[in-house]
Amino acid sequence: MRRVILTVAATVAGLVALLSFKTHSSSPERAGAAPSPSPALLPGEHTIDGNVANTVYGPVQIQVVLATSKIVKVNILQQPESTQMDVQIGQYAFPRLIGETLSAQSARIDTVSGATYTSGGYIQSLQSALDNGG
Amino acid sequence: MSVLTVPRVDARIRHAEQVMGTVVSFDVPVSAKANGSLDSAVRWLHWADRVFSPYRPDSDVSLLAAAEVTVDGCAPEVAEVVAACASIRDLSGGYFTAAPGGRFDPSGYVKGWAVQRAADLLSAAGSAAHVVNGGGDAQCAGGRAPGEPWRVGIADPSRPGRLALVVAALDCAVATSGVAERGPHILDPHTGRPAAGLASLTVVGPSLALADAYATAAFAMGPALAREWTASLDGYEAFAITPDAQTWHTPGFGRYVCADAGS
């Protein structure tokens, strides 16, 4: 039975939801997001770009790399880097979020057991991604 | 408050319900939605929250803690919970307590117990396979497919969003205690200080009410005593992660580990 082979749409939506849980409109002086080039694709792979999400940290856009219908990689097209805080958040949060998505997919899990989260923490949790996309 | 309800292609439904200060996630057959048992399970959780919440001044637990009522004046489930807490307190040498900080507060038992009972309601209404996960503590009924266990990822406390391992859960519960998102919150009742020495401790066994309470007690014990005590538990196995990312487990835990987990 197919379980946690997250669909592309759900994963993009999930990542954007994870990133934008404190959404606000980005202010002009914080619009310094730097697009990064898309790495080369292997044969059989194709990409889908997510919408730009305005998060509390600034604009964020991700791209998923697919081989057939399975996500093999997630690239960051835009991330905030206008302040030192943003760089730290990017270095910490993006690998975490990407790892979360790929980890759930490769492990084919149905649910997660861990230290109890609050309803606010749930939004950022792997369980939330499963509930949205599983 | 309902957070979301997502229909699934394989005739299952996921539902996430905000209750008891966390989110309870359901993975159920569509029949549980159709026959009303999912709604009943959700109503049960909200009822348990109203009766047992120490944060509601008019809950039975608050009135009992303030000595404004006796156990006899409360819902009958309160006496059941009080007795269960006393039993686990004795079994754990006092490391599990229904009075952390001196005031009656059985929250350490109630969430796992209420989630287990929600899962039982779904079983009684005919569901053969479902998971109810209360903020990271899951009661699994049946498996993800006939004869195939549910796959429960154990969060890696040192790498948020990553998994330490995957547990194969067929008709059993998985509960994890650890340093929560708001920092240390489990106190050693003998010292009144935050428990130290473990990053997380997972207990697997038939009942979530017991697995959750055992995990809390063992976490409070610290690594040396926890290892010895969890090995002595009948029908329950434990897996622990230390702050420096070392792990240990009870001798019988191995049968729950999914060998093919690619985390």
Image (tube, coloured by chain):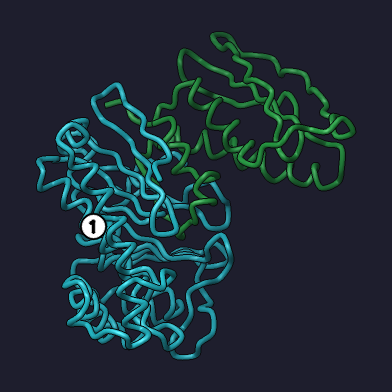
Chain colours: A green, B cyan
Task: Say left or right for B190 vs B113.
Answer: right
Tell me the quadrant of the picture where the N terminus of chain A can be found: top left
- Residue flagged by tag 1: what amino acid is it? Gln
Q: Nearer the viewer, residue B15 or A79?
A: B15
Chain of the residue under label 1: B
Q: Quadrant of residue B37?
A: top left
Tell me the quadrant of the picture where the C terminus of chain A can be found: top left
Figure check: B93 above or below B40 = below
Task: Say left or right for A29 vs B204.
Answer: right
Task: Say left or right for B21 vs B43.
Answer: right
User: Can you identify the residue that label 1 sits on?
Assistant: B116
**Residue B121: image location, x then y, percent:** 16, 50
Mark 1: secondary structure: helix
Q: Quadrant of residue B54?
A: bottom left
Task: Say left or right for A125 vs B83.
Answer: right
Figure check: A120 above or below B3 = below
Q: Nearer the viewer, residue B131 or B63?
A: B63
**Residue A88: image location, x then y, percent:** 78, 47
Q: Residue at x 41, y 73 (%)?
A: B57
Figure check: B253 above or below A131 = below
**Residue B102: image location, x then y, percent:** 42, 88
**Residue A119: image location, x then y, percent:** 49, 52
